[in-house]
Image (cartoon, grey):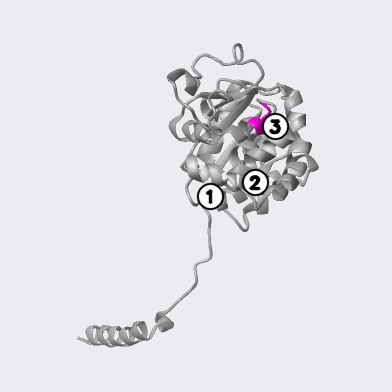
Amino acid sequence: MQSSKYSIEDYQRAGDDMFNRLHLDSYPVSIKYIKNIEDDIPVGVRRPIDTKEKMSICQAFTYARRFRQKLCITAADNFCTPSSVAHGWVPLTMEEFVESQVRQKWSKDAQAEKRRAEHTYAQNFKNIIELAYRGVIVSPLTETPVIPDAIMIYCNGPKLTYIINSLNYEHKRKYRIQSTFEGFGESCAKGGLMPFITRKCQIVIPGTGDRSFAGIQDHELGIGMPASYIFYVLENLFQTGAGQGLKFPLRQLIPKLDEKLTPGFKYMREIIDKKLSEMKNE
């Protein structure tokens, strides 16, 4: 599913370019799914379980983008068990999945969870399980040791708009953004897995796990994309409007005001003008 058109060095340079041109607060995240835990983990990539730790995927994203760590998360490393199931690392029946979520009390009742499972589990999990992936390698894109399958970028609203504008610059179906929202699994699923599986970009509004575990800031949003799409984004970055509208840095309208704005300003203006006139005539 992954194109070999671009090299690891190309992706590293793209990460640098995106980070610097958009003045991002953290590095774009490189996401690579692996099938063989023994053979597919590069030197320099660590597993939390090797130091007797556990870590969620969204936490690994934070360590990668803010602390430049390279990590591999598998079902054994991941304390966020629903995301291990969602990634197909451990097969559960739909009934087992529903029971686990009922105990979490995320939704109103068992019927609500069954409706959710019929929509998400049947359409996604079974297909993912058949792909036989067993883990994910996460790193800052600027230092990625592998050619990524997906890229996740965290940023604020205006910077996300620039990325969306870039993807829509030619309005090609390939780059069209398709997003659904649940409030769960936003970064791990929509930031990485769904763009990889569906080849479609996903807007990410950090969800419950992100905010509880991963230190997401209130202003942060994100976008997940198939890895090679970052080159298309960079090609079109800041092209929308040909210098009109949004520019970088963001140029917002500044109202033209005078001292009539408030009674106090107006009163003081009259005094100042009188004093300036007196000073001029001295």
Callout 3: helix, strand or loop?
helix
In the picture, the disc for residue 2 is none
Q: Is residue 256 above or below residue 3?
A: below
Residue 25: x and y, percent? 47, 42
Q: Which mark is residue 203?
A: 2
Q: Residue 151 occupies which quadrant of the picture?
A: top right
Mark 3 surroundings: few (<14), some (14-19) or many (≥20) residues within 10 A: many
- Residue under pointer 3: 196
Q: Secondary structure at mark 2?
A: strand
Kindly identify the residue that appears in the image at 57 percent across and 53 percent down.
247
Query: Residue type at mark 2?
Result: Ile
Q: How many residues crowd mark 2 within 10 Å: few (<14), some (14–19), many (20+)?
A: many
Q: Residue 201 in the image: x percent, y percent?
A: 69, 41
Front-lying residue, 66 or 281: 66
Calculate the distance from the C-alpha at mark 2 to the C-alpha at mark 3.
14 Å
Left/right placement of residue 224 relative to residue 256 reads right
